[in-house]
Amino acid sequence: MKDVTIQFIPFGELAYLSSYKRVKKLIEMAEENKIILIQGKLEPQEEADLIEETMRKIGRSSKFKGIELTSFVPQTKNLTIFQGLREKMANALVGNRDSLTIIGPATVVREIKKDPTKIELYLRK
């Protein structure tokens, strides 16, 4: 198996790219056997575009086998009305930075399991 790199991408690195450039950059990184940890969450349309572009790449390449993708949004409980309002306002202003998105090449990542408190990433041997 080739070397695998885990790369963290802070929210600000993708925030100002167009959706097209964001998806293109993520696909290129997955093709380089990188497991990508993104601070924040992709928009639903971007996730759909990422999957669609992945399917196109699979059809054109015998080497690229696809991606595994998941997002994790921590559950906040027992917030006061003021705290909940403050959190919603902060997310509206700067984006949802509390979430984590994981994208990995299917040749490396066998499975991603998640529940409300954790994510488990299983790699191929």
Image (cartoon, helix red, strand yellow):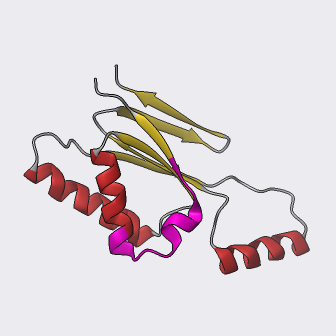
When the figure is inspected, residue 82 is found, relative to residue 3, above or below; the finding is: below
Residue 14 is inside the magenta segment? yes
| Closer to us: 19 or 17 | 17
Q: Quadrant of the N terminus?
A: top left
41, 94: nearer the viewer: 94
Compared across the picture, whether 110 is left or right of 57 comes to right
Q: Which residue is drawn at 38% across and 74% down?
A: 19
The image position of residue 72, as x and y in percent, is 58, 51
Q: In this view, does 10 lie above or below 88?
A: above
Task: Read off the magenta span.
Answer: 8-21
Whether 122 is drawn above or below 72: the answer is above
Count of marks placed on residues: 0
Horizontally, residue 1 falls left or right of residue 22, namely left
Q: Which residue reaches farthest top? A: 125
Q: Is residue 92 magenta?
A: no
Q: Quadrant of residue 45?
A: bottom left
Residue 86, position as x, y percentages in the image? 82, 75
Residue drawn at (32%, 73%), measured in percent from left and top? Answer: 20
Write the residue at 74% across / 75% down: 90
In which quadrant of the rendered image does the C terminus lie?
A: top left
Picture layout, residue 45 above or below residue 31: below
The foreground one among 69 and 15 is: 15
> Which residue does the image show at 55% across and 40% down from the upper left?
114
Residue 33 screen position, x and y as percent? 32, 39
Estimate the x, y position of residue 42 in percent, counting from the top left. 48, 64
